[in-house]
Amino acid sequence: MVIMKKGHQPKCIKYIESSPMLIWEGYKFIGNRGRKFGTEVLEMRLMGQKVMGIRGPQAARIFYNDRYFKRKGAAPKRVQKTLTGENGVQGLDEAEHRQRKMMFLSIMNQDNLAQLNKILLKQWKIQSRKWEQEDSIVLFDYVQEMLCRVACQWAGVPLKKSEIKLRADDLGKMVDGFGAVGLRQWQGRIARKRTETWISNIIDQIRSNNYKPRDGSAAYIIAWHYNLTGELLSKQVAAVELINIIRPIVAITTYIVFGALAMHKYPECRRKLQLGDERYARMFVQEVRRYYPFTPFVGALVKQSFLWKQHLFKKGTLVLLDIYGINHDPRIWDWPNEFYPERFFAWKENPFDFIPQGGGHASSGHRCAGEMVTIEVMEASYRYLARNMQYKVPRQNLHYSLRRIPTLPKSRFIIKKIRIK
Ligand code: HEM
């Protein structure tokens, strides 16, 4: 139901309760309404709470201005209990945020990235040799497990052979559950509880010198990180932050599967990847991150009331930035609904118009701390899939629904007749 203010241009759209429409329209929810009514600002109610949605080429610039927005208290419990955990970096502001964010960025140094690449390539080789013995595999499930091994080894988290499947499933369910209601949401909550217990024990072991991770590894840095008041992070927060490293690495599986789908749908892209041109590989990665859906929106609270595009944003209002919509906005991207990696050839690297992992700058704002890790893992994985692996893609349901958040091809990408070159 839509109510427009009397005598008002159809710019500010007020909804009585929009949750059913969000569930129905998923990724396109903000964009559809905005396009229909020709507005960059939407007012709505989600679960009874007044929420504003912003979209369009200028939206990220205002959203990532910390004069106007803060994160403390912004994330719904539903998201904290599954995806992010409670009291982690995502909900911090100002000095506390900057200090915690530096902790994350110190993990992403060149030596650590090189190490990650080495571990990843080794795992691709070992695991794909095993896949060769199978009639067919579901790529999503196998890569998720492989990335769980990679993430834990890299981050300094001990992982027994017998628990790999459970841990990989749990890390996947925490991501799968955040946009859901009902069963998927509960599975995500259970997975988070179990994972936090597991990782809290590891933090304990590190702090009591019963287990020593590699110096400079994520586990080491996080377990021994002191906050602004000079105390070690609480065990719960340290666990949440270490999970903030391993969970998203495992989540790159989604992009690997979408990349494999793109190579299947556009064989000329696969051929170009096989030629080994590094510039093309990077453009392909960027286009997968732009074109395929992953993060739908991000949220923040208005810190002090302000006007934007003639709309009043009142202090305390939750505002959602339309990530998916901005990555498909025809005012930013020519032919936004075409998969066309070469569009990145002349891309000007504007931090506010290409925002699959948030906008602005990682060091000063909430932009993803693991963007470089994501890009490198994707690039190395696509190179391996295109150049080192031969496989057939049997008939299957590769459709992915934009109503489901997060989404995936229905069959999770089955491949068969795998041969390693
Ligand atoms: C699977 C690919 C990934 C996607 C789609 C993704 C997406 C995002 C998004 C949308 C945000 C929030 C930005 C905001 O709040 O404005 C974020 C934040 C974050 N990401 Fe990622 N991310 C990915 C991979 C990674 C990886 C590999 C790591 C670490 C190794 C990572 C660590 C983080 C952290 C710590 C934050 C919180 C940053 C902050 O609040 O300051 N992410 N990510």
Image (cartoon, grey):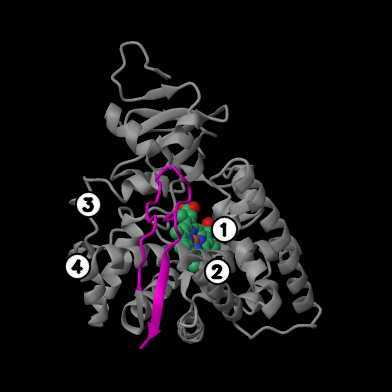
| Magenta-drawn segment | 392-421
First reached walking from the N terminus: tag 1 or tag 3 = 1
Residue type at mark 3?
A: Trp
Q: Are marks 3 and 2 in contact (CB under 8 Å)?
A: no
Give the residue at mark 4: 345
Q: Is residue 230 rendered to the left or right of residue 83?
A: right
- Is label 1 within 8 A of ligand 1 (CB to nearest ligand atom)? yes
Residue corresponding to mark 3: 333
Q: Where is mark 1, residue-wise?
A: 97
State yes or no: discs 1 and 4 in contact (Cβ < 8 Å): no
Q: Earlier in the sequence, mark 1 or mark 2?
A: 1
Residue occupying image coordinates x 72% and y 60%: 194
Q: Is residue 159 left or right of residue 398?
A: right
Which one is closest to the eye, mark 3 or mark 2?
3
Q: Are marks 4 and 3 in contact (CB under 8 Å)?
A: no
Hey, what amino acid is under mark 1? His
Q: Tell me the CA gap for discs 4 and 3.
A: 13 Å
> Residue at (60%, 56%) from the top-left corner?
174
Q: Is mark 2 within 8 Å of ligand 1?
A: yes
Label 2 sits on what residue type? Phe
Asked if residue 416 is positioned above or below residue 29 in the image, the reply reads below
